[in-house]
Image (cartoon, coloured by chain):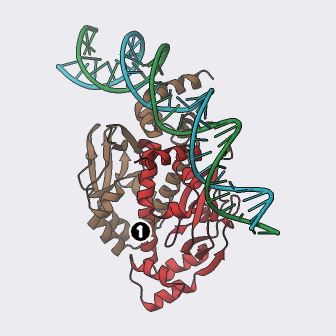
Chain colours: A red, B brown, C cyan, D green
Amino acid sequence: MSFDLILKNVSRHIALTPAEEDIFISLLRTKEISRRDFLLRPGEISRCESFVSKGCLRMYHVDDKGVEHIVLFAVEEWWAGDMYSFLTQRPASLYIEALEDTQVLQIDKASLDRLYAEVPKFERFFRILLQNAFVAQQNRILQNLSFTAEERYREFMDKYPGVDQRVPQKMIAAYLGITPEFLSVLRKKRAGR
Amino acid sequence: MSFDLILKNVSRHIALTPAEEDIFISLLRTKEISRRDFLLRPGEISRCESFVSKGCLRMYHVDDKGVEHIVLFAVEEWWAGDMYSFLTQRPASLYIEALEDTQVLQIDKASLDRLYAEVPKFERFFRILLQNAFVAQQNRILQNLSFTAEERYREFMDKYPGVDQRVPQKMIAAYLGITPEFLSVLRKKRAGR
DNA sequence: GTAAAAAATTAAGGTAGATTAATTTCTATC
DNA sequence: GATAGAAATTAATCTACCTTAATTTTTTAC
Protein backbone atom coordinates (compact mmCIF):
# COMPACT_ATOMS: atom_id res chain seq x y z
CA MET A 1 0.00 0.00 0.00
CA SER A 2 0.97 3.56 -0.69
CA PHE A 3 1.21 4.66 2.96
CA ASP A 4 3.40 1.83 4.24
CA LEU A 5 6.60 3.67 3.51
CA ILE A 6 5.64 6.86 5.32
CA LEU A 7 4.30 4.96 8.33
CA LYS A 8 7.50 2.96 8.55
CA ASN A 9 9.39 6.23 8.33
CA VAL A 10 7.36 7.88 11.10
CA SER A 11 7.69 4.84 13.33
CA ARG A 12 11.45 5.27 13.40
CA HIS A 13 10.97 8.30 15.62
CA ILE A 14 7.57 8.10 17.31
CA ALA A 15 5.15 5.24 18.08
CA LEU A 16 1.61 5.67 16.81
CA THR A 17 -1.59 3.86 17.76
CA PRO A 18 -3.69 2.59 14.82
CA ALA A 19 -6.14 5.43 15.48
CA GLU A 20 -3.33 7.99 15.28
CA GLU A 21 -2.07 6.39 12.10
CA ASP A 22 -5.54 6.83 10.63
CA ILE A 23 -5.68 10.50 11.56
CA PHE A 24 -2.28 11.04 9.99
CA ILE A 25 -3.14 9.24 6.78
CA SER A 26 -6.48 11.00 6.47
CA LEU A 27 -4.61 14.30 6.36
CA LEU A 28 -2.29 13.23 3.55
CA ARG A 29 -2.98 13.68 -0.13
CA THR A 30 -1.32 11.56 -2.79
CA LYS A 31 -0.01 13.34 -5.84
CA GLU A 32 1.61 11.97 -8.98
CA ILE A 33 3.86 14.20 -10.99
CA SER A 34 5.58 13.40 -14.23
CA ARG A 35 9.20 13.90 -15.00
CA ARG A 36 10.00 17.57 -15.65
CA ASP A 37 6.85 18.79 -14.00
CA PHE A 38 7.03 21.20 -11.10
CA LEU A 39 5.67 20.85 -7.62
CA LEU A 40 6.54 24.48 -6.93
CA ARG A 41 7.90 27.52 -8.74
CA PRO A 42 9.27 30.81 -7.41
CA GLY A 43 6.50 33.30 -6.73
CA GLU A 44 3.98 30.62 -5.82
CA ILE A 45 3.08 29.97 -2.22
CA SER A 46 4.17 26.59 -0.93
CA ARG A 47 0.95 25.09 0.41
CA CYS A 48 2.37 21.76 1.53
CA GLU A 49 5.35 19.64 2.47
CA SER A 50 5.92 16.57 0.33
CA PHE A 51 7.19 13.11 1.25
CA VAL A 52 8.60 11.20 -1.71
CA SER A 53 7.14 7.70 -1.80
CA LYS A 54 8.50 6.94 -5.26
CA GLY A 55 10.74 8.81 -7.67
CA CYS A 56 13.09 11.72 -7.35
CA LEU A 57 12.79 15.48 -6.93
CA ARG A 58 15.25 18.32 -6.99
CA MET A 59 14.86 21.60 -5.17
CA TYR A 60 16.78 24.47 -6.69
CA HIS A 61 17.25 28.19 -6.94
CA VAL A 62 18.06 30.26 -10.01
CA ASP A 63 20.29 33.21 -9.17
CA ASP A 64 20.41 36.70 -10.72
CA LYS A 65 22.81 35.54 -13.39
CA GLY A 66 20.46 32.72 -14.37
CA VAL A 67 22.60 29.98 -12.81
CA GLU A 68 20.86 27.03 -11.10
CA HIS A 69 21.94 25.96 -7.62
CA ILE A 70 20.58 22.76 -6.17
CA VAL A 71 19.58 22.78 -2.52
CA LEU A 72 18.48 19.17 -2.28
CA PHE A 73 17.84 15.94 -4.13
CA ALA A 74 14.90 14.09 -2.59
CA VAL A 75 14.55 10.39 -3.36
CA GLU A 76 12.28 7.85 -1.63
CA GLU A 77 11.69 8.62 2.07
CA TRP A 78 12.89 12.23 1.87
CA TRP A 79 10.78 15.31 2.51
CA ALA A 80 10.91 18.30 0.19
CA GLY A 81 9.40 21.76 0.50
CA ASP A 82 10.22 25.43 0.57
CA MET A 83 10.20 25.76 4.32
CA TYR A 84 10.31 29.54 4.26
CA SER A 85 7.31 29.86 1.98
CA PHE A 86 5.41 27.11 3.77
CA LEU A 87 5.88 28.67 7.21
CA THR A 88 5.22 32.25 6.25
CA GLN A 89 2.77 31.58 3.39
CA ARG A 90 4.71 34.10 1.36
CA PRO A 91 6.07 33.61 -2.17
CA ALA A 92 8.63 30.86 -2.64
CA SER A 93 12.04 31.42 -4.16
CA LEU A 94 12.69 27.77 -5.03
CA TYR A 95 11.73 25.39 -7.78
CA ILE A 96 10.78 21.82 -6.94
CA GLU A 97 10.92 19.64 -10.02
CA ALA A 98 10.43 15.93 -10.64
CA LEU A 99 13.49 14.29 -12.20
CA GLU A 100 11.57 11.04 -12.66
CA ASP A 101 7.86 10.22 -12.63
CA THR A 102 7.27 10.69 -8.95
CA GLN A 103 4.67 9.99 -6.30
CA VAL A 104 4.50 12.24 -3.25
CA LEU A 105 2.38 12.30 -0.11
CA GLN A 106 1.52 15.87 0.79
CA ILE A 107 0.32 17.58 3.91
CA ASP A 108 -0.86 21.17 3.76
CA LYS A 109 -0.40 23.77 6.46
CA ALA A 110 -3.92 23.60 7.85
CA SER A 111 -3.72 19.81 8.04
CA LEU A 112 -0.35 19.93 9.71
CA ASP A 113 -1.68 22.34 12.32
CA ARG A 114 -4.61 19.99 12.90
CA LEU A 115 -2.21 17.08 13.15
CA TYR A 116 -0.14 18.89 15.80
CA ALA A 117 -3.35 19.61 17.71
CA GLU A 118 -4.78 16.10 17.49
CA VAL A 119 -1.59 14.08 17.75
CA PRO A 120 0.95 16.27 19.55
CA LYS A 121 3.58 13.56 19.14
CA PHE A 122 4.01 14.87 15.62
CA GLU A 123 5.56 18.04 17.03
CA ARG A 124 8.33 15.74 18.16
CA PHE A 125 8.49 13.88 14.87
CA PHE A 126 8.96 17.01 12.80
CA ARG A 127 11.35 18.45 15.35
CA ILE A 128 13.53 15.36 14.98
CA LEU A 129 13.42 15.53 11.16
CA LEU A 130 14.39 19.17 11.38
CA GLN A 131 17.23 18.46 13.78
CA ASN A 132 18.66 15.91 11.40
CA ALA A 133 18.25 18.22 8.43
CA PHE A 134 19.85 21.01 10.41
CA VAL A 135 22.92 18.93 11.25
CA ALA A 136 23.22 17.80 7.62
CA GLN A 137 23.02 21.39 6.39
CA GLN A 138 25.62 22.52 8.89
CA ASN A 139 27.97 19.84 7.61
CA ARG A 140 27.34 20.96 4.07
CA ILE A 141 28.19 24.56 4.99
CA LEU A 142 31.42 23.44 6.63
CA GLN A 143 32.33 21.25 3.69
CA ASN A 144 31.63 24.03 1.22
CA LEU A 145 33.99 26.19 3.26
CA SER A 146 36.80 23.71 3.76
CA PHE A 147 36.72 21.12 0.98
CA THR A 148 37.98 21.37 -2.58
CA ALA A 149 35.54 20.53 -5.37
CA GLU A 150 37.12 17.09 -5.62
CA GLU A 151 36.60 16.38 -1.92
CA ARG A 152 33.01 17.58 -2.09
CA TYR A 153 32.37 15.28 -5.04
CA ARG A 154 33.80 12.28 -3.20
CA GLU A 155 31.69 13.14 -0.15
CA PHE A 156 28.56 13.44 -2.30
CA MET A 157 29.14 10.04 -3.87
CA ASP A 158 29.64 8.48 -0.43
CA LYS A 159 26.68 10.15 1.19
CA TYR A 160 24.10 9.80 -1.56
CA PRO A 161 24.96 6.44 -3.08
CA GLY A 162 23.01 5.69 -6.21
CA VAL A 163 21.77 9.24 -6.66
CA ASP A 164 24.47 9.90 -9.24
CA GLN A 165 22.90 7.12 -11.35
CA ARG A 166 19.51 8.84 -11.25
CA VAL A 167 20.31 12.48 -11.95
CA PRO A 168 22.20 14.18 -14.79
CA GLN A 169 25.80 15.00 -14.06
CA LYS A 170 25.31 18.70 -14.61
CA MET A 171 22.88 18.70 -11.70
CA ILE A 172 25.45 17.13 -9.44
CA ALA A 173 27.72 19.99 -10.49
CA ALA A 174 24.93 22.45 -9.61
CA TYR A 175 24.69 20.81 -6.19
CA LEU A 176 28.44 20.92 -5.60
CA GLY A 177 28.76 24.51 -6.77
CA ILE A 178 31.01 23.89 -9.77
CA THR A 179 30.57 23.92 -13.55
CA PRO A 180 29.68 20.71 -15.43
CA GLU A 181 32.93 21.11 -17.37
CA PHE A 182 35.01 21.08 -14.23
CA LEU A 183 33.12 18.10 -12.80
CA SER A 184 33.95 16.28 -16.01
CA VAL A 185 37.64 16.99 -15.42
CA LEU A 186 37.39 15.67 -11.85
CA ARG A 187 35.70 12.48 -13.02
CA LYS A 188 38.40 11.87 -15.57
CA LYS A 189 41.09 12.24 -12.90
CA ARG A 190 39.18 9.86 -10.62
CA ALA A 191 38.69 7.26 -13.35
CA GLY A 192 42.44 7.14 -13.80
CA ARG A 193 42.75 5.48 -10.37
CA MET B 1 16.75 39.96 36.33
CA SER B 2 18.82 37.47 34.43
CA PHE B 3 15.88 35.48 33.03
CA ASP B 4 13.87 38.37 31.58
CA LEU B 5 15.58 38.21 28.23
CA ILE B 6 15.01 34.50 27.69
CA LEU B 7 11.38 34.70 28.83
CA LYS B 8 10.76 37.58 26.46
CA ASN B 9 12.39 35.49 23.76
CA VAL B 10 10.24 32.44 24.48
CA SER B 11 7.09 34.54 24.60
CA ARG B 12 7.58 35.53 20.98
CA HIS B 13 6.60 32.01 19.98
CA ILE B 14 4.61 30.39 22.79
CA ALA B 15 2.59 31.75 25.73
CA LEU B 16 3.55 30.44 29.17
CA THR B 17 1.68 30.55 32.44
CA PRO B 18 3.68 31.80 35.45
CA ALA B 19 3.89 28.19 36.67
CA GLU B 20 5.32 27.05 33.33
CA GLU B 21 7.79 29.90 33.40
CA ASP B 22 8.95 28.70 36.80
CA ILE B 23 9.45 25.16 35.59
CA PHE B 24 11.44 26.43 32.63
CA ILE B 25 13.63 28.69 34.73
CA SER B 26 14.22 26.01 37.33
CA LEU B 27 15.75 23.86 34.60
CA LEU B 28 18.20 26.53 33.43
CA ARG B 29 21.67 27.02 34.80
CA THR B 30 23.50 30.34 34.53
CA LYS B 31 27.12 30.22 33.47
CA GLU B 32 29.67 32.98 33.12
CA ILE B 33 32.58 32.49 30.80
CA SER B 34 35.44 34.86 30.23
CA ARG B 35 36.71 36.03 26.89
CA ARG B 36 38.76 33.33 25.19
CA ASP B 37 37.39 30.54 27.33
CA PHE B 38 35.64 27.60 25.75
CA LEU B 39 32.14 26.31 26.31
CA LEU B 40 32.98 23.25 24.21
CA ARG B 41 35.91 21.66 22.43
CA PRO B 42 36.04 18.89 19.85
CA GLY B 43 36.06 15.46 21.47
CA GLU B 44 33.97 16.59 24.42
CA ILE B 45 30.31 15.70 24.62
CA SER B 46 27.98 18.65 24.37
CA ARG B 47 25.85 18.34 27.49
CA CYS B 48 23.71 21.44 26.95
CA GLU B 49 22.36 24.09 24.65
CA SER B 50 23.26 27.68 25.59
CA PHE B 51 21.26 30.89 25.27
CA VAL B 52 23.43 34.00 25.24
CA SER B 53 22.04 36.54 27.70
CA LYS B 54 25.10 38.79 27.48
CA GLY B 55 28.25 38.74 25.38
CA CYS B 56 29.28 36.97 22.23
CA LEU B 57 30.25 33.43 21.24
CA ARG B 58 31.64 31.90 18.10
CA MET B 59 31.13 28.31 17.03
CA TYR B 60 33.82 26.99 14.72
CA HIS B 61 35.47 23.97 13.20
CA VAL B 62 39.17 23.43 12.51
CA ASP B 63 39.73 21.42 9.35
CA ASP B 64 42.47 18.91 8.52
CA LYS B 65 44.74 21.64 7.26
CA GLY B 66 44.35 23.54 10.53
CA VAL B 67 42.12 26.24 9.05
CA GLU B 68 39.27 27.64 11.17
CA HIS B 69 35.76 27.89 9.72
CA ILE B 70 33.09 29.74 11.64
CA VAL B 71 29.62 28.20 11.71
CA LEU B 72 27.95 30.88 13.79
CA PHE B 73 28.37 34.04 15.80
CA ALA B 74 25.95 34.09 18.73
CA VAL B 75 25.26 37.43 20.40
CA GLU B 76 22.48 38.26 22.86
CA GLU B 77 19.29 36.21 22.33
CA TRP B 78 20.95 33.58 20.14
CA TRP B 79 21.29 29.90 21.00
CA ALA B 80 24.55 28.05 20.47
CA GLY B 81 25.39 24.38 20.72
CA ASP B 82 26.80 21.44 18.81
CA MET B 83 23.45 19.97 17.84
CA TYR B 84 24.93 16.72 16.59
CA SER B 85 26.83 16.04 19.79
CA PHE B 86 23.95 17.18 21.97
CA LEU B 87 21.43 14.93 20.27
CA THR B 88 23.57 11.84 19.99
CA GLN B 89 25.70 12.42 23.10
CA ARG B 90 28.72 11.57 21.00
CA PRO B 91 31.94 13.60 20.71
CA ALA B 92 31.62 17.12 19.32
CA SER B 93 33.58 18.37 16.36
CA LEU B 94 33.08 22.05 17.09
CA TYR B 95 34.64 24.64 19.35
CA ILE B 96 32.41 27.15 21.13
CA GLU B 97 34.47 30.07 22.39
CA ALA B 98 33.60 33.33 24.13
CA LEU B 99 34.74 36.38 22.18
CA GLU B 100 33.75 38.65 25.06
CA ASP B 101 33.02 37.98 28.72
CA THR B 102 29.75 36.20 28.28
CA GLN B 103 26.77 35.02 30.29
CA VAL B 104 24.78 32.04 29.04
CA LEU B 105 21.70 30.21 30.26
CA GLN B 106 22.10 26.51 29.75
CA ILE B 107 19.74 23.58 29.58
CA ASP B 108 21.10 20.05 29.60
CA LYS B 109 19.63 17.12 27.76
CA ALA B 110 17.91 15.51 30.74
CA SER B 111 16.34 18.83 31.70
CA LEU B 112 15.20 19.47 28.17
CA ASP B 113 13.55 16.04 28.05
CA ARG B 114 11.83 16.84 31.35
CA LEU B 115 10.77 20.18 29.96
CA TYR B 116 9.23 18.55 26.91
CA ALA B 117 7.39 16.13 29.18
CA GLU B 118 6.13 18.73 31.66
CA VAL B 119 5.48 21.61 29.27
CA PRO B 120 4.90 20.08 25.84
CA LYS B 121 4.55 23.56 24.36
CA PHE B 122 8.33 23.66 24.35
CA GLU B 123 8.37 21.03 21.61
CA ARG B 124 6.77 23.71 19.53
CA PHE B 125 9.12 26.43 20.71
CA PHE B 126 12.26 24.53 19.78
CA ARG B 127 10.69 23.37 16.53
CA ILE B 128 10.10 26.98 15.57
CA LEU B 129 13.66 27.97 16.50
CA LEU B 130 14.93 25.10 14.42
CA GLN B 131 12.74 26.02 11.46
CA ASN B 132 14.14 29.54 11.49
CA ALA B 133 17.69 28.28 11.83
CA PHE B 134 17.08 25.82 9.02
CA VAL B 135 15.85 28.53 6.65
CA ALA B 136 18.80 30.76 7.56
CA GLN B 137 21.25 27.92 6.91
CA GLN B 138 19.64 27.13 3.58
CA ASN B 139 20.06 30.74 2.55
CA ARG B 140 23.67 30.63 3.61
CA ILE B 141 24.25 27.52 1.49
CA LEU B 142 22.67 29.19 -1.53
CA GLN B 143 24.65 32.36 -1.02
CA ASN B 144 27.89 30.44 -0.65
CA LEU B 145 27.07 28.80 -3.98
CA SER B 146 25.99 31.87 -5.91
CA PHE B 147 27.56 34.97 -4.38
CA THR B 148 31.07 36.33 -4.82
CA ALA B 149 33.08 37.00 -1.66
CA GLU B 150 32.20 40.68 -1.98
CA GLU B 151 28.47 39.97 -2.13
CA ARG B 152 28.69 37.62 0.83
CA TYR B 153 30.50 40.31 2.82
CA ARG B 154 27.84 42.89 2.01
CA GLU B 155 25.14 40.41 2.99
CA PHE B 156 26.88 39.64 6.28
CA MET B 157 27.13 43.33 7.15
CA ASP B 158 23.44 43.82 6.40
CA LYS B 159 22.24 40.74 8.21
CA TYR B 160 24.38 40.93 11.34
CA PRO B 161 24.60 44.67 11.94
CA GLY B 162 27.01 45.59 14.72
CA VAL B 163 28.61 42.15 14.84
CA ASP B 164 31.52 43.37 12.75
CA GLN B 165 32.27 45.88 15.55
CA ARG B 166 32.45 43.09 18.11
CA VAL B 167 34.55 40.41 16.42
CA PRO B 168 37.99 40.53 14.79
CA GLN B 169 38.01 40.92 11.04
CA LYS B 170 39.85 37.68 10.48
CA MET B 171 36.90 35.86 12.05
CA ILE B 172 34.50 37.49 9.63
CA ALA B 173 36.78 36.16 6.90
CA ALA B 174 36.60 32.70 8.52
CA TYR B 175 32.81 32.98 8.45
CA LEU B 176 32.70 34.09 4.82
CA GLY B 177 35.15 31.43 3.69
CA ILE B 178 37.90 33.75 2.50
CA THR B 179 41.34 34.73 3.77
CA PRO B 180 41.81 37.78 6.02
CA GLU B 181 44.10 39.22 3.34
CA PHE B 182 41.40 39.07 0.71
CA LEU B 183 38.78 40.53 3.05
CA SER B 184 41.15 43.42 3.57
CA VAL B 185 41.26 43.97 -0.18
CA LEU B 186 37.45 43.95 -0.37
CA ARG B 187 37.18 46.47 2.46
CA LYS B 188 39.58 48.81 0.74
CA LYS B 189 37.52 48.65 -2.45
CA ARG B 190 34.35 49.33 -0.48
CA ALA B 191 35.85 52.27 1.42
CA GLY B 192 36.60 53.94 -1.92
CA ARG B 193 32.86 54.47 -2.39
C1' DG C 1 14.80 3.94 -36.51
C1' DT C 2 16.22 8.47 -37.26
C1' DA C 3 16.79 13.38 -36.60
C1' DA C 4 17.27 16.90 -33.30
C1' DA C 5 18.26 18.29 -28.90
C1' DA C 6 20.56 17.79 -24.65
C1' DA C 7 24.43 16.18 -21.96
C1' DA C 8 29.12 15.18 -21.46
C1' DT C 9 33.92 15.69 -22.78
C1' DT C 10 38.11 18.11 -24.01
C1' DA C 11 41.15 21.91 -24.36
C1' DA C 12 42.85 26.84 -24.36
C1' DG C 13 42.86 30.95 -22.07
C1' DG C 14 41.17 33.85 -18.09
C1' DT C 15 40.03 35.39 -13.17
C1' DA C 16 38.62 35.36 -8.23
C1' DG C 17 40.65 34.46 -4.51
C1' DA C 18 44.91 31.95 -2.12
C1' DT C 19 49.64 32.10 -0.62
C1' DT C 20 53.66 34.16 1.02
C1' DA C 21 56.00 37.67 3.03
C1' DA C 22 57.01 42.24 4.43
C1' DT C 23 55.11 46.45 6.84
C1' DT C 24 51.99 48.92 9.70
C1' DT C 25 48.59 49.42 13.19
C1' DC C 26 46.27 48.00 17.13
C1' DT C 27 45.79 45.95 21.87
C1' DA C 28 47.15 43.71 25.97
C1' DT C 29 50.09 43.38 29.76
C1' DC C 30 53.45 44.59 33.04
C1' DG D 1 53.57 54.37 28.92
C1' DA D 2 56.78 50.94 26.83
C1' DT D 3 56.92 46.68 24.63
C1' DA D 4 55.49 42.30 22.69
C1' DG D 5 52.26 39.94 20.34
C1' DA D 6 48.28 39.90 17.52
C1' DA D 7 45.58 41.83 13.79
C1' DA D 8 45.25 44.29 9.61
C1' DT D 9 47.17 46.01 5.32
C1' DT D 10 49.67 45.82 1.02
C1' DA D 11 51.77 43.75 -2.89
C1' DA D 12 53.71 40.00 -5.85
C1' DT D 13 53.00 35.58 -7.36
C1' DC D 14 50.29 31.41 -7.89
C1' DT D 15 46.29 28.09 -8.54
C1' DA D 16 41.67 26.07 -8.42
C1' DC D 17 38.14 26.66 -10.92
C1' DC D 18 35.59 29.39 -14.72
C1' DT D 19 34.61 30.71 -19.56
C1' DT D 20 34.26 29.87 -24.16
C1' DA D 21 33.99 26.98 -27.83
C1' DA D 22 34.44 22.91 -30.50
C1' DT D 23 33.58 17.74 -30.57
C1' DT D 24 31.50 13.52 -29.13
C1' DT D 25 28.05 10.86 -26.86
C1' DT D 26 23.53 10.10 -25.08
C1' DT D 27 18.67 10.93 -24.83
C1' DT D 28 14.27 12.30 -26.60
C1' DA D 29 10.49 12.60 -29.70
C1' DC D 30 8.19 11.73 -33.88
Provide the chain ID for the residue under circle 1: A
Q: Where B92 sits versus B128, above or below?
A: above
Residue A10 or residue A85, whichever sits in front: A10
The residue positioned 68% from the left and 47% from the top of the image is A66
Q: Where B16 sits versus B142, above or below?
A: below
Q: Where A157 sits versus C29, above or below?
A: below
Q: Is residue A186 left or right of residue C9?
A: left
The residue positioned 47% from the left and 67% from the top of the image is B15
- Residue situated furthest bottom in the rendering: A19
Are there few (<14), some (14-19), or many (20+) residues within 10 Å of tag 1?
A: some
Q: Is residue B40 left or right of residue A104?
A: left
Position in image of residue A117 (x %, y %): 50, 79
Res. B168 in view: no
SS at mark 1?
Answer: helix
Position in image of residue B104 (x %, y %): 32, 50
The residue positioned 40% from the left and 56% from the top of the image is B6
Q: Identify residue for label 1.
A: A128
Disc 1 marks a residue whose amino acid type is: Ile
Res. A32 in view: yes
Position in image of residue A139 (x %, y %): 41, 52
Q: Is residue B125 left or right of residue B49?
A: right
Q: How many marks?
A: 1
The residue positioned 50% from the left and 77% from the top of the image is A116
Position in image of residue A47 (x %, y %): 64, 70
